[in-house]
Image (tube, rainbow, N blue to C red):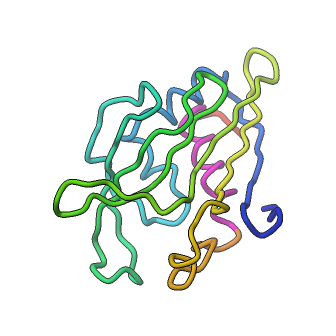
């Protein structure tokens, strides 16, 4: 894991699968719990494939440190460039239906390495998180192995024969 200016972290892995296949796995919210390296993502609530910028998809989550334990995030697709990049902003849906986003983004950048391999970089960027949120949330909120673990999980889903 690489921390850059203490505002984002990233990890990179070569996956033994074509970029289109890797992108398809990432664009399928039903795979996100299997990709997640923390165990926080439980299940996709909105199960339709991601198709464009602005799309909202919700995920059931669990974190022992969260006030409710079980909670839900509403993610907004911010980057959608098949098969090169996909990313989303996690947020919450308020009781009145308004969506609020905290300013951090998950982004996957895919670079084909021939017909059957893809270099994937996963970045977690919190540079847009306002100070009032930084006062009660620590960034990044996960340990150093999370991004690498997530990429290895993605490799297993995209290509069952992947050696990662």
Examine the image and state in which quarter residue 125 appears.
Answer: bottom right
134 or 113, which is in the foreground?
134
Task: Residue at 68% x, 51% y: name it.
Answer: 123
Residue 44 among those drawn in magenta: no
The answer to whether residue 69 is left or right of residue 114 is left
Task: Residue at 32% x, 54% y: name it.
Answer: 99
89 or 11, which is in the foreground?
89
Examine the image and state in which quarter residue 97 appears.
Answer: bottom left
Q: Position of residue 24 (x, y in %)?
A: 51, 26
Q: Main secondary structure of the magenta part?
A: helix
Q: Position of residue 142 (x, y in %)?
A: 59, 72
Q: Position of residue 30 (x, y in %)?
A: 36, 41
* Picture layout, residue 111 above or below residue 69: above
* Picture layout, residue 42 above or below residue 85: below
Quadrant (top left/top right/bottom left/bottom right) for the N terminus: bottom right
Quadrant (top left/top right/bottom left/bottom right) for the C terminus: top right
In this view, which residue lies farthest toward the left? 96
Task: Residue at 38% x, 82% y: name it.
Answer: 64
162 or 155, which is in the foreground?
155
* Picture layout, residue 146 above or below residue 99: below
Segment tinted magenta in the rendering? 145-160
Residue 146 among those drawn in magenta: yes
Q: Position of residue 118 (x, y in %)?
A: 74, 29
Task: Residue at 37% x, 29% y: name it.
Answer: 49
Q: How many marks?
A: 0
């Amino acid at each position: 894991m690489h921390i850059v200016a203490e505002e984002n972290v990233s990890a990179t892995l070569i996956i033994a699968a074509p970029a289109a296949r890797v992108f398809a796995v990432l664009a399928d919210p039903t795979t996100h719990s299997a990709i997640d390296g923390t165990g926080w993502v439980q299940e996709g609530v909105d199960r339709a494939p991601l198709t464009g910028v602005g799309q909202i998809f919700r995920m059931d989550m669990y974190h022992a440190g969260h006030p409710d334990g079980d909670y839900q995030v509403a993610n907004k697709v911010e980057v959608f460039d098949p098969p090169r990049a996909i990313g989303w902003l996690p947020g919450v849906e308020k009781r009145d239906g308004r969506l609020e986003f905290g300013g951090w983004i998950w982004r996957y950048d895919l670079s084909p390495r021939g017909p059957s391999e893809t270099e994937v970089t996963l970045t977690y960027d919190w540079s847009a998180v306002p100070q009032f949120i930084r006062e009660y949330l620590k960034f990044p909120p996960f340990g150093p192995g999370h991004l690498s673990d997530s990429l290895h999980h993605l490799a297993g889903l995209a290509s069952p024969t992947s050696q990662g």
